[in-house]
Amino acid sequence: MAEKAAASKAYLRPHFKTHHSAEIGNWFRAFGVSRCTASSVDMAAYFAKAGWDDITIAFPYNPLESEEISEIAKDTTLNVLIESEESLKLANDLIRNPVGYFIKIDLGTHRTGIDPSHLQLIEALVSGSTDQVMFKGFIGHAGHTYYSADIKKIFEESLTILADLKDRFGGIISYGDSPSCSMVDDFSGIDEIRAGNFVFYDWMQVQIGSCKIEDIGVCLASPVVAIHKERCEVVVFGGAVHLSKESVAENGSKSFGKAVRLNENGWEHEVIGNVKKISQEHGIIEMSLEVLEELKIGDLIGILPTHSCLAADLQGHYYSTTGERIPKIIKD
Amino acid sequence: MAEKAAASKAYLRPHFKTHHSAEIGNWFRAFGVSRCTASSVDMAAYFAKAGWDDITIAFPYNPLESEEISEIAKDTTLNVLIESEESLKLANDLIRNPVGYFIKIDLGTHRTGIDPSHLQLIEALVSGSTDQVMFKGFIGHAGHTYYSADIKKIFEESLTILADLKDRFGGIISYGDSPSCSMVDDFSGIDEIRAGNFVFYDWMQVQIGSCKIEDIGVCLASPVVAIHKERCEVVVFGGAVHLSKESVAENGSKSFGKAVRLNENGWEHEVIGNVKKISQEHGIIEMSLEVLEELKIGDLIGILPTHSCLAADLQGHYYSTTGERIPKIIKD
């Protein structure tokens, strides 16, 4: 991702909401990454404390956390997202140290952001820039790539929208969604890439076509606690509190993750079962009788999560494939 | 629940996997509760440390945690769940201090447990009782009540199955699922009730008919960060990392939670919006234009979770409606 960004004269500001870990964040430094993205004020505070001094909180500015934002902004180049005059006024009134702001543009996902045709509102937001709350540019997340067959087309459309705004109003273009950042090679015209999921990838990204199964970098070691031959199911301690309830639809059923064999170096890339149901702690994996007969109670099986960001959020820490404990943010 | 259990000559062993909190666990003491249920070994260790000396881990025994189980069992009456001869042998081989075991019976949910007609296997498991790993009785969780229109019928069928096994093999009957424990008044014939969700309830239980909205005891305070009048949507900081991705189907759409107004004493019981979409940190609440026009950026709105157990698991702590911080298990 860093190479692709450099080749396109963009820089990478990876989203750290996938791994939630200062140690994993440090791995990016070797690739020349010096800026990062967070999805909450708490996460920004955590990475600021870990030495990141240029952070964008890619979530609409929450005025109730202005005090925490001011604290981080004391020693950190910090950007927030603005999408209304109301928010911009509150940011000016309540944030005590200089911050930058990106105007959030709705690229077609209709989750957050301003319709790019609302030029009057965008102009008002650009011209509201002050020394304390400074306009930095336009930010977009084409989340509709997750449901589209033509991801490159969405990327092209998004680029056109953002480039037009940059031409009119100045600032930089910050862009990021994992499917298009993975599948597009040339980011020319974009200043900053915010993709983050690629650090781990997951089964959803395999399904979308962003990556191959070999690219998935995180796996849940799950103990087999029950085997039900009569219905070709294995029950593991690996449920919604470990994997989250995120699923993708597949052949009329659901997948909450894919089972793989663990080995000494990590895990194998052959899918041996589908996590078809999940409750608080139970994962129900459907597999062939042949594979099921390899297993016994107490074996560990790997599960590639459907959505690694959510599965990682649910863990207290990771282990590397060489057995090192890797800490992450703790919610307390 | 304690009164209903007592009137039926059953005792209450509430499941603490809903609240995950030693402090909330203590509230049960005032109702004469002295035993509890946990869904993981870690959770059992946490509540043992908090003074609970009679705990059932209502999840199939995981031999990989035999060391941790042995530690807890040193000073605690601890029960595990067994559903295969393989597991029972491993428990006998690996657990160092005396524990009890319940035989897990599949009451029709087909998640875990033994088909009650497999009397030969059940007999083998009962007769495998030793001084170290002692048979205690039969345990069932009628999870199919969550998808049924006739919850009382499922309860009656479950009771018949478990009573028949008790007659044949002895031991006690431990029963628990929130819908039937909420909707059935007479538990006669059951020795132990394991319901847990009733401590908080949630929108799913309202939908099932287990409780009324007024009975819900937990609510996510969520800041409004964006307002989209044109599509009658409000965006809050309240996503999958706060509420989980659990949803219920409603009128062809989904509900990840219900929005309510917060007030000085907690929250109001009128639903003012539906959390129709959720991503990692974003909650998208659909509401009428009339209600939406009351709101401004930075307001706090309450969300009654669809599944309180999962939403609570995602929090670091709670606040009581009088502002006290209530700690809970921390995953680290």
Image (cartoon, coloured by chain):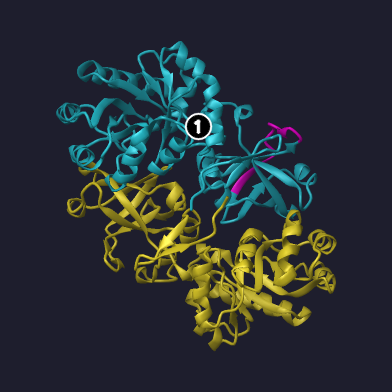
Chain colours: A cyan, B yellow
Residue A128 falls left or right of residue B98: left
Residue A314 falls left or right of residue B61: left
Query: Three-letter amino acid code at disc 1?
Result: Asn
Note whether B7 is above or below B14 in the view shown: below
Q: Specify few, some or many for label 1: CA neighbours under 10 Å numbering under 14, 14-19, or 20 or more.
A: many
Which of these two is toward me, A169 or B109?
A169
Q: Which residue is mark 1?
A: A197
Note whether A78 is above or below B168 in the view shown: above
Quadrant of the rendered image containing residue A77: top left
Q: Residue at x 55, y 51 (%)?
A: A240
Residue B296 appears in view: yes
Residue A286 belongs to the span the image colors magenta: no
Total number of numbered labels?
1
The magenta segment: A264-276
Residue B193 falls left or right of residue A298: left
Quadrant of the rendered image containing residue A311: top right
Q: Does dot 1 land on a helix, a strand or a loop? A: helix
Chain on which label 1 sits: A
Which of these two is toward me, B61 or B324?
B324
Instruction: Measuring from the top left, give residue B295's x and y in whole percent.
Output: 21, 51
Note whether A284 is above or below A112 in the view shown: below
Residue A273 falls left or right of residue A248: right
Instruction: Measuring from the top left, give residue A259's x and y in whole percent.
Output: 66, 41
